[in-house]
């Protein structure tokens, strides 16, 4: 008799995505640049990756707070005070550091309140199904982050009407909402900054449509948190001026370099999520040492040092964009901390990443299914602690790789619509 586990394992290896990547790993073991091991972290953004020291342009710790002495000290003191974890679901109790961190976070955002989840993915998986009932509707930008679409699948399984609309298209959004009527309420879900292209949605127009169609905006601003807007508060407040009809999801582990995700909302929504959201009720919380560090990060973000870090990041991003354009590289995005360069063919994209690695730079070479087939990109993540010399070296290296591979980058080919995963 066959071993069921062995049969399951064999069947999984034959599924399309697993077979695709397994073949990739077998055929191109030195080129694919995936599943690598970081062995050491040096000063600035130098890392030892698979035995080679390189400058890291693949880090989403955009402000460099993962290296900040005060943040590291808060983590150490938090361990001494609370131990390594809370030990129970927040349905039963929260450590005081959790309440303080949420209050500080809401104050920094200028939001009514905030609720912290263990990750942005769990925020979206837990909040979207919990915010609606079978009388309501959920519409999602077709290129919103993978975890938003996964949250929508859970919502659909609960009887909530769900649909997608064309990327950043107000007319498509209006048609989709009209098609789903009648509903009691609707949520319109999207990214605040699209993580592959670095572009942003037309929030003002989407808000107008939302109010006309009895809907609420839901913006996953994970890649804008700590980076865009006044004092890094993200895309929503600067664009819309308030959170009156918007729920904002943000990351605590990218620009803010701590741990977890959050949703900024009013107190009624916060209470409802605490009792209706599966990850909140049945999962473990962010470990207390990181909650202590969040309060320290809020101190930094509200200080002159925080303004300086944001200024450094923006200067570095402008420096990269300017040098890249001068070199004929035509980056897409680049308004926050992410810029992408469309290479196209999967093999060419992987090879470009490998050649950059050999020149001393790590840049994520992103291929299908993270982006559509034949739309592979080099995704550059600029940090505040990169030096301008490092950025210049990267641009020169990319230009030399483009020349070596005989690539012809066209400004009209810059990716506007890209699928998102948890990269």
Image: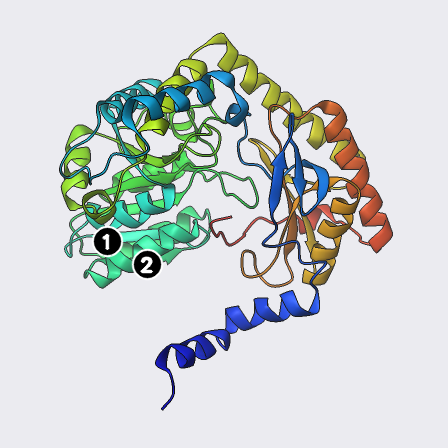
x 19%, y 52%: residue: 136
The one nearer the camera, 91 or 136, is 91
The one nearer the camera, 241 or 205, is 241
Label ID, residue 137? 1
The one nearer the camera, 257 or 264, is 257
The answer to which image quadrant residue 266 occupies is top left
Residue 333 seen by the camera: no
> Residue 36: image x %, image y %?
61, 51
Left or right, 398 with respect to 165, comes to right
The quadrant of the image that shows the N terminus is: bottom left
Residue 302 seen by the camera: yes
Q: CA distance from mark 2 to mark 1?
A: 8 Å
Residue contact between numbered discs 2 and 1, judged by CB atoms under 8 Å:
yes
x 76%, y 39%: residue: 360
Label ID, residue 161? none
Q: Which residue is mark 2?
A: 163
Compared to residue 197, the image places residue 375 above or below, namely below
> Residue 127: image x %, image y %?
26, 45
């Amino acid at each position: 008799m066959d071993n069921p586990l062995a049969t399951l394992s064999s069947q999984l290896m034959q599924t399309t995505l697993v077979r695709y990547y397994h073949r990739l790993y077998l055929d191109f073991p030195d080129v694919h640049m995936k599943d690598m091991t970081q062995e050491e972290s040096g000063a600035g953004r130098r890392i030892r990756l698979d035995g080679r020291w390189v400058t890291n342009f693949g880090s989403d710790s955009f402000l460099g707070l993962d290296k900040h002495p005060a943040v590291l000290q808060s983590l150490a003191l938090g361990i001494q005070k609370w131990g390594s974890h809370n030990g129970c679901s927040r349905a039963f109790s929260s450590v005081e550091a959790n309440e303080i961190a949420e209050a500080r976070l809401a104050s920094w955002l200028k939001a009514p309140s905030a609720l912290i989840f263990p990750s942005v993915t769990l925020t979206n998986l837990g909040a979207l199904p919990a915010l609606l009932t079978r009388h309501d509707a959920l519409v999602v930008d077709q290129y919103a982050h993978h975890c938003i679409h996964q949250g929508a699948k859970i919502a659909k399984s609960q009887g909530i009407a769900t649909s997608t609309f064309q990327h950043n298209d107000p007319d498509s959004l209006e048609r989709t909402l009209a098609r789903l009527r009648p509903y009691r309420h609707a949520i319109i879900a999207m990214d605040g900054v699209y993580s592959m292209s670095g572009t942003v949605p037309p929030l003002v127009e989407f808000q107008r449509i939302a109010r006309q169609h009895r809907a609420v905006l839901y913006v996953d601003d994970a890649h804008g948190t700590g980076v865009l807007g006044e004092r890094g508060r993200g895309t929503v407040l600067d664009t819309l001026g308030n959170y009156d009809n918007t729920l904002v999801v943000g990351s605590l582990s990218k620009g803010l370099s701590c741990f977890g995700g959050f949703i900024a909302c009013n107190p009624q929504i916060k209470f409802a999520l605490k009792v209706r959201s599966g990850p909140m009720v049945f999962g473990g919380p962010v470990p207390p040492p990181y909650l202590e560090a969040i309060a320290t990060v809020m101190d930094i973000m509200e200080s002159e040092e925080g303004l300086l870090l944001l200024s450094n990041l923006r200067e570095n991003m402008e420096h990269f964009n300017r040098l890249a354009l001068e070199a004929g590289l035509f980056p897409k995005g680049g308004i926050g901390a992410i810029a992408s360069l469309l290479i196209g063919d999967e093999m060419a994209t992987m090879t470009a990443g490998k050649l950059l690695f050999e020149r001393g730079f790590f840049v994520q070479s992103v291929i299908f299914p993270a982006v559509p087939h034949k739309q592979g990109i080099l995704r550059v993540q600029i940090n505040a602690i990169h030096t301008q010399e490092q950025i210049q070296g990267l641009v020169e290296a990319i230009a030399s790789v483009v020349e070596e591979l005989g690539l012809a980058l066209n400004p009209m080919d810059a990716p506007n619509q890209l699928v998102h995963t948890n990269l």
